[in-house]
Image (spheres, rainbow, N blue to C red):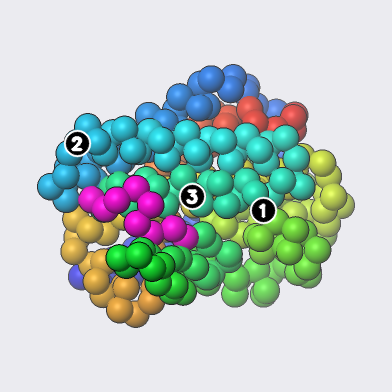
Amino acid sequence: MFKKFTGIVLIVFTLSAVESAHAVESVDDATIIGINIVIQSLIGAIGAAIHGKSFFKGLRNGALGGAVIATGKFMVGRSYQLAWPSKLTVALGSSMVENTARGQELFSTLGFDVGPLYFSWQRVKTQYKFRTDFMIGPSVVLIKSMAETDRFDWEASLMTGTPVFLKDDLGENWAGLAYGNTIWLKTKYARHPTVLSHELIHTYQYSSYAAGGAVFIDLFGVNEVYRKLHLRVEEDVGNFLFAYPETQLMPYLERPHEREAYGLTDLR
Ligand SMILES: [Zn+2]
């Protein structure tokens, strides 16, 4: 089961790139906040119920996490210079929902991803225990990025806490791509005011589905195996469930995740 599960994660992940470049009908701020809260509260509630905890407490805590996630997305929509605080805000909200969906206390584990690494602190009694896990999808993407792009953008990567790669020829239609939590920019758009913000929002969308993936992983009972090996697939599985289908079923301009990213930035 473990091998089969990991295989599916890998195949799907490498297919689910998200692009940006065209005009799209944007959505207003209230809708974006509302959708983030509704999705995360349902994930929190279902996860809590599966773990024998209160559905309604899960609903409430998931909603809180969803509001924190939305806040982080709004911050980076204003400016990519807010990338670190916004990234950590999204990570906090995502951790809150993941804890809820696993039947744990709201702040029991706090973590954030940087490329293929996931750093987390788990509260044990009065102390926090640190651990590092390797994220399967982003590891594959890192290798792919080194093979297929022209260079690594150190400045943008350090400024955003997100691996940013530059490629002169990204295809005629695209200014940038987000592969999970990794960004490719067309070189001439490397310092464009909103392309980077737009792609960062896609990486936050990726991070925000950890709880959705966690519910699924716990249902299959494979979480212990991954934890022992220090592997993490929560985000990959969550994105397979929540973001991948629209890339297969909907035209680019109509996809909810594009509408959110365009709605939060001024990119037109
Ligand atoms: Zn996009």
Q: Which mark is drawn over residue 92? A: 3
Q: Position of residue 14 (x, y in %)?
A: 50, 61
Task: Find numbered disc 3 in the image and state the secondary structure of the residue it sits on.
Answer: helix
Q: Residues within 10 Å of mark 1 (few under 14, many from 20)?
A: some
At a point 44% along the width and 48% down the height, the residue shown is 94
Residue 125 vs residue 19, the one in the foreground: 125
The residue indicated by pointer 2 is 55
Residue in the image at 62% along x and 23% along y:
26
| Type of amino acid under label 3 | Leu
In the image, taking residue 120 as reference, residue 197 lies left or right, namely right
Which image quarter: residue 23? top right
* Disc 2 and disc 1 in contact, CB within 8 angstroms: no
Q: Quadrant of the C terminus?
A: top right
The residue identified by callout 1 is 84
* Label 2 crowd (10 A; few <14 / some 14-19 / many >=20): many
- The vertical placement of 86 against 27, above or below, is below
**What is the number of the mark on residue 183?**
none
The three-letter amino acid code for the residue at tag 2 is Phe
N-terminal-most mark, 2 or 1 = 2
The residues colored magenta run 103-111
